[in-house]
Image (cartoon, helix red, strand yellow):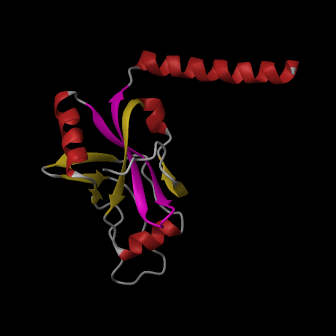
């Protein structure tokens, strides 16, 4: 029998986060994927350097790739340093890749990275979501809800 998956992933140290993704997209399914990294990339991530604000993931054949993510060169690296914006292979189960491929092809969804983090075992992971883009009026609605919740909190705090 398969081991049940936890609802929330055990994030120990968040390195990079894509905060705009929750505003720009409706998030459907969230996956945890490993990343195939080179040695200096891991060192750079451990120092807290990395950016996934403009990155996305794509399915090519039987593999998923993280494209346009920026992990800067390691400051103490030598000639074997890595390329900062190279595409990085994501490690997922075949079933998950097939599900992502079907959603991207048929439903017109996008694979958006939400965060890069180290789990409790010290492995670098990417939180990846299948998402559908929001229209302008949906974004306005999100802003209204966020402002209203902030006002509610302020009123509750004032009246005790």
Q: Is residue 73 visible?
A: no
* Residue 32 as seen in the image, left or right of residue 14: left
Q: What range of the chain is rendered magenta?
A: 109-133
Is 121 inside the magenta-drawn segment?
yes
The spot of residue 44 in percent (x, y) is 47, 70
Q: Quadrant of residue 35?
A: bottom left
- Please report the residue visible at 25 percent of the width from the left and 52 percent of the height from the top: 93
The spot of residue 76 in percent (x, y) is 48, 81
The spot of residue 103 in percent (x, y) is 22, 33
* Residue 55 as seen in the image, left or right of residue 145: left
* Residue 101 as seen in the image, left or right of residue 80: left
- Please report the residue visible at 60 percent of the width from the left and 23 percent of the height from the top: 146
Helix, strand or loop for the magenta stretch, by majority: strand
Please identify the residue farthest to the bottom as the structure is shown.
78
Give the vertical position of 60 relative to 84 (above or below).
above
- Please report the residue visible at 74 percent of the width from the left and 24 percent of the height from the top: 153
Give the vertical position of 35 relative to 152 (above or below).
below
């Amino acid at each position: 029998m398969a081991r049940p998956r936890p609802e929330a992933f055990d994030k120990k140290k968040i390195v990079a986060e894509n905060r705009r993704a929750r505003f720009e997209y409706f998030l459907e399914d969230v996956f945890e994927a490993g990343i195939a990294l080179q040695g200096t990339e891991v060192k750079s991530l451990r120092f807290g350097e990395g950016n996934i604000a403009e990155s996305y993931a794509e399915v090519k054949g039987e593999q998923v790739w993280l494209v346009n993510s920026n992990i800067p060169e390691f400051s103490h690296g030598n000639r074997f340093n890595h390329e900062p914006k190279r595409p990085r292979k994501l490690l997922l189960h075949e079933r998950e890749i097939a599900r992502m491929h079907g959603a991207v092809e048929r439903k017109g969804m996008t694979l958006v990275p939400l965060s890069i983090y180290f789990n409790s075992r010290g492995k670098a992971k990417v939180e990846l979501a299948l998402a559908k883009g929001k229209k302008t009026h949906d974004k306005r609605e999100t802003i209204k809800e966020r402002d209203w919740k902030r006002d509610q909190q302020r009123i509750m705090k004032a009246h005790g």
